[in-house]
Every structure is written in C-alpha cells, then in structure tokens.
Image (cartoon, helix red, strand yellow):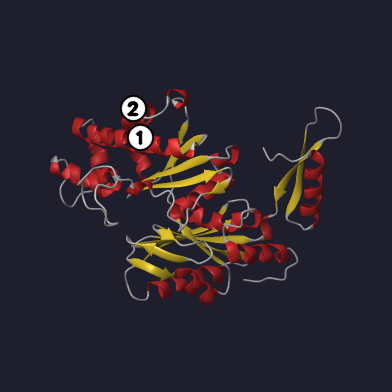
C-alpha cells in the first residue's frame, strides 16, 4: 500500500513518463471503463554496480533499475593485503569499462559495521579493517557515487525493493552462514542505529564465559551456531576431520546420521530463541531467512520452529517466517540495491551520495551522463 490518492498517482505517473523513467506496457482487461495499462521502469535509465567484499573473494554485478542482474563476476581477493583497496578499485574499473550504459553508482556490501552509507568508513574484523576509509578512496578513484553498507543491511534493502519485503513495511532479514546477520526494516526504513551497528544479532550475548568471538566478546550467538562453531562441534563429535567443513556435516545429515542431524537441530533451537528475542524488540510483520546456511535448512528447521515459537507471546506465535532460496549473487545484488533505492528514499539514508545518485538519474534520461 502506498497510501496515495488516485489523482496523486496519476500526477506522479505523468511526471515519470515525461522524464522517461517509466514506460507504458501492454493493456490489461478492464472491469469497466477504459482498459488499464501496465507501467514498467525504463531499463536504459541507468545501471547500478553492486560489490560484495569478503576476506578472500569479491563478487561484482551490474544491475538494471528493475533489479535484473545484467552481469556477474567473482574474483579472488585478499582483504588483508596493504593495497586491498587499490585492487578492488582496479576490479571495479574493469567492470565500469565493460558497461556501455549510464552508471548511477556503486554499492559496496561488507561484513562489518559502516559508520554511515555516506561516509563509507568501515570496521570489519573478519576483513582485518579498522576505521577503513573505503568509501572516500573509491569515490576519489572512480569519480562516481559510492554507497557503502553492512552486507546484511544491503540484503534487507534489496528485500524491500524486490523481495518479500515489497508487501510488508516492517520485517527482519536474517542470514545464516559464516555468522548470523540481521537487517531490520521498520515502517519502510532501514534501521542502522547511532553508528551503523544495529542488527548485529550474531553478537548477542548467549553463553556466559562462552567461546571467544572475533569481535572480542565471549559467548556471542555466532560462537554457538555460526559456521566455525558448528564445524568445531562436529570435530569434537568425530563427525569430520580438521580438513573437512560444514558441507561434510550436511552430507552426513542427508545420509541419515543422527548426530549430524541433532547438531543442526540444536543450533536451530538457539537461533530460534535469539530471533524470538529480536521480534519482541522490533515487532515485525514477517521474518525472512536466507544465506549460504539455508542449504541445510531441512535440518535447522525442526529446532528453529521449537525455539522460535516457544519464545513468542501467545498472541504472536503465528508470526510468519519465509525461507528464501539462496544464490551467492544475492550479496552483490543487495549492494546494488543501495544505489537503486537511493532516489526513492525519503529519509535520505545515503546522504550526499544518495543526492548524487538522484542527480545522475535525473540527467541520464537526456544522455548527459556517461560512465
């Protein structure tokens, strides 16, 4: 629901048509009166580039304004080397050179906290980055808008634009993988907190005097149900060797190994209880689950259902959750969504970079901007 009058919708639509940002598609049957016409976004309006930066890999996609992935590439990468930013810039320059259409900007998703999308200053322990000025470096090098954000927050923005979140104004996006992440959309807006750290549920205190986490605290949720934690538990049980990983545990579960099945089920209970706690704070309409760990969801789900439902108020026990299929391109698509959402973000989350994207969008229809 957009809560606008028909007259306002008509006025806005005429304006967008005049600026060549949308176009009329085919007619659809009418229930009475003039036949209705479908409206679509004009692909040539612009393209966004999305980048997912991981410790050993960079994924880069180019995305049309309607969310269609136009190209996707993965590159080996080492975030810990001294010239990591330079190497990332070179990869992006290669992508920009390949594109023949207008580029609205670059969105970058990282597994860490970002001071603001506009500042682009990153603290990412898993990448070895502290107070890293990634945004300013890339803007200076590429000379186009660059919006930097936590990768799970970026996924939540993509969900709002193109996924389950299109029909909900308040929802949680939960990722299961190396860690546990959470992006929070409330009343249509991304919740970032004072310093960009909102939604870091992977670091919820879960076990007193528990294992030491990468963040420096003890007993975080990730140290109990994150990928490294589950692999460690599997080795203690003798299920896998030091050279094997969680994929091997999943194969055992699929073959009917009771210990492997129980490992995922127990993790599901803990995860379900943690998300139930977040639900009490945020009060979402739905929970969206995705990420690399979804491959083992059939084994997470029995425990998750128990933990999630038992942690809810009686009136909220029917709160829905949806598990979405996963593709690694979604990380970079989420980053691109930061750019594509900027022109329509009334709260101006992207600040000055969002303004620059809007300017490029407004002039690209007349061909004044070139990549």
Determine whether 352 is above or below 331 in the image: below
The image position of residue 116, as x and y in percent, is 50, 61
Determine whether 81 is above or below 327 in the image: below
Q: Quadrant of the N terminus?
A: top right
Q: What residue do we see at 19% from left, 43% from top?
A: 233
Residue 57 visible in the picture: yes
Q: Nearer the viewer, residue 294 or 288?
A: 288
Q: Nearer the viewer, residue 194 or 367?
A: 194
Q: Secondary structure at mark 1?
A: helix
Q: Quadrant of residue 105?
A: bottom right
Q: Quadrant of residue 38?
A: top right
Q: Nearer the viewer, residue 162 or 174?
A: 174
The image position of residue 139, as x and y in percent, is 53, 72
Q: Is residue 36 left or right of residue 209?
A: right
Query: Pointer 2 and pointer 1: residues touching (CB < 8 Å)?
Result: yes
Q: Is residue 36 left or right of residue 107?
A: right
Q: Is residue 306 left or right of residue 93?
A: left
Say which residue label 1 marks: 272
Q: Earlier in the sequence, mark 2 or mark 1?
A: 1
Q: Quadrant of the C terminus?
A: bottom right
Say which residue label 2 marks: 306
Q: Nearer the viewer, residue 288 or 33?
A: 288
Answer few, some or many: residues within 10 Å of disc 1's Cα (few below 14, many 20 plus, some between 14 and 19). Answer: many
């Amino acid at each position: 629901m957009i809560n606008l009058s028909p007259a306002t919708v008509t006025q806005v639509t005429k304006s967008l048509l005049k600026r060549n940002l949308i176009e009329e598609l085919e007619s659809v049957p009418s229930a009475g009166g003039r036949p209705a016409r479908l409206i679509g976004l004009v692909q040539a309006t612009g393209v966004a580039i999305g980048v997912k930066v991981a410790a050993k890999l960079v994924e880069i996609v180019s995305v049309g304004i309607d969310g269609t992935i136009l190209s996707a590439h993965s590159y080996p990468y080492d975030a810990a080397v001294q010239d990591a930013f330079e190497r990332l810039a070179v990869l992006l320059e290669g992508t920009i050179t390949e594109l023949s259409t207008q580029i609205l900007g670059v969105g970058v998703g990282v597994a860490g906290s970002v001071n603001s999308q506009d500042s682009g200053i990153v603290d990412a322990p898993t990448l070895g980055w502290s107070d890293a000025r990634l945004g300013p470096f890339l803007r200076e090098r590429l000379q186009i808008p660059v919006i930097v954000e936590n990768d799970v927050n970026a996924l939540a923005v993509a969900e709002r634009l193109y996924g389950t979140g299109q029909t909900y104004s308040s929802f949680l996006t939960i990722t299961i993988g190396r860690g546990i992440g959470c992006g929070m959309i409330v009343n249509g807006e991304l919740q970032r907190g004072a310093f960009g750290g909102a939604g870091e549920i992977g670091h919820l205190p879960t076990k007193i005097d528990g294992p030491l986490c990468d963040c420096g605290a003890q007993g975080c949720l990730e140290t109990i149900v994150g990928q490294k934690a589950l692999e460690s538990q599997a080795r203690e049980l003798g299920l896998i060797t030091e050279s094997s990983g969680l994929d091997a545990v999943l194969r055992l579960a699929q073959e009917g190994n009771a210990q492997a099945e129980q490992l995922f089920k127990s993790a599901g209970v803990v995860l379900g209880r943690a998300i139930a706690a977040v639900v009490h704070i945020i009060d979402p309409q739905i929970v969206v689950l995705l990420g690399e760990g979804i491959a083992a969801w059939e084994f997470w789900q029995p425990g998750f259902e128990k933990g999630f439902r038992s942690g809810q108020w009686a009136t909220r026990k029917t709160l829905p959750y949806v598990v979405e299929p996963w593709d690694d391109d979604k990380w970079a698509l989420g980053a691109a969504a930061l750019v594509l959402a900027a022109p329509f973000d009334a709260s101006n989350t992207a600040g000055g970079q969002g303004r620059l994207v809007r300017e490029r969008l407004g002039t690209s229809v007349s061909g004044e901007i070139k990549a």
